[in-house]
Image (cartoon, rainbow, N blue to C red):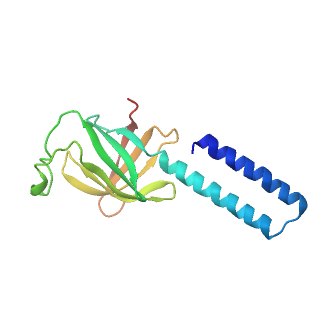
Amino acid sequence: MTLLQYNMLIIIYFINLKDSFKTDFNMSTLKKYSILVLILFIGVKANAQKDFLGKWLSPSKKGVVETYIQGNKLYGKLIWVKDERKDIYNADKSLRNREVKGMVMFNDFSWEDGQWTNGKIYDPEGGSTYSSKMWLSEDKQTLFVRGYIGISIIGRTEKFSKYLK
């Protein structure tokens, strides 16, 4: 359902609800009002989550990560790299022979208060995995990804740019 179709559905429902208020406020009207509030809440949440989906150019401009939702979690896969190579910096020596392109860099992010939190981000340049959270700029063209060890204050925020090609 597109955003326009969704908004039209809300308007039609609201018009019907308005007519109910003219006659009598009863349990049926209360149920309709509750359903409207629920639809609005779910729609806003779903649209906000979708803003994070797409392709993002890394801060170093050496890779593009495509974000997607699987189950209720957000992930990001490295779909393009400037220079193809193996994961030679990985702290786990058994993983150093895998290709960097195609690896999942963003793992297990949960939706909470308008941002994706409690996830993990893998840094192929340093071979380390960090706790992470992410949020969008107001114009939804910049993805801020904060990686940290332990608590969020001890960390660094990187800016991924919306990749439009």
Q: Where's the C terminus, which quadrant? A: top left
Give coordinates of residue 106: x percent, y percent.
32, 52
Q: Please state the total of marks drawn on the protein image.
A: 0
Classify residue 158 as left or right of residue 31: left
Residue 81 position (above or below residue 69): above
Nearer to us in this view, 143 or 104: 104
Taking the spot 13% from the left edge, 58% from the top edge, the residue there is: 92
Give coordinates of residue 88: x percent, y percent.
11, 47
Classify residue 120 as left or right of residue 42: left
Q: Residue furthest top?
A: 165
Classify residue 42 as left or right of residue 30: left
Classify residue 155 as left or right of residue 90: right
Taking the spot 73% from the left edge, 47% from the top edge, the residue there is: 11
Nearer to us in this view, 29 or 64: 29
Nearer to us in this view, 100 or 134: 100
Residue 110 position (above or below residue 159): below
Nearer to us in this view, 51 or 89: 51
Q: Quadrant of residue 22?
A: bottom right
Q: Is residue 153 visible?
A: no
Q: Residue furthest right?
A: 23
Q: Is residue 113 visible?
A: yes
Q: Where's the N terminus, which quadrant? A: top right
Give coordinates of residue 16: x percent, y percent.
79, 53
Taking the spot 30% from the left edge, 46% from the top edge, the residue there is: 77
Q: Residue furthest bottom?
A: 27
Taking the spot 31% from the left edge, 64% from the top edge, the residue there is: 150
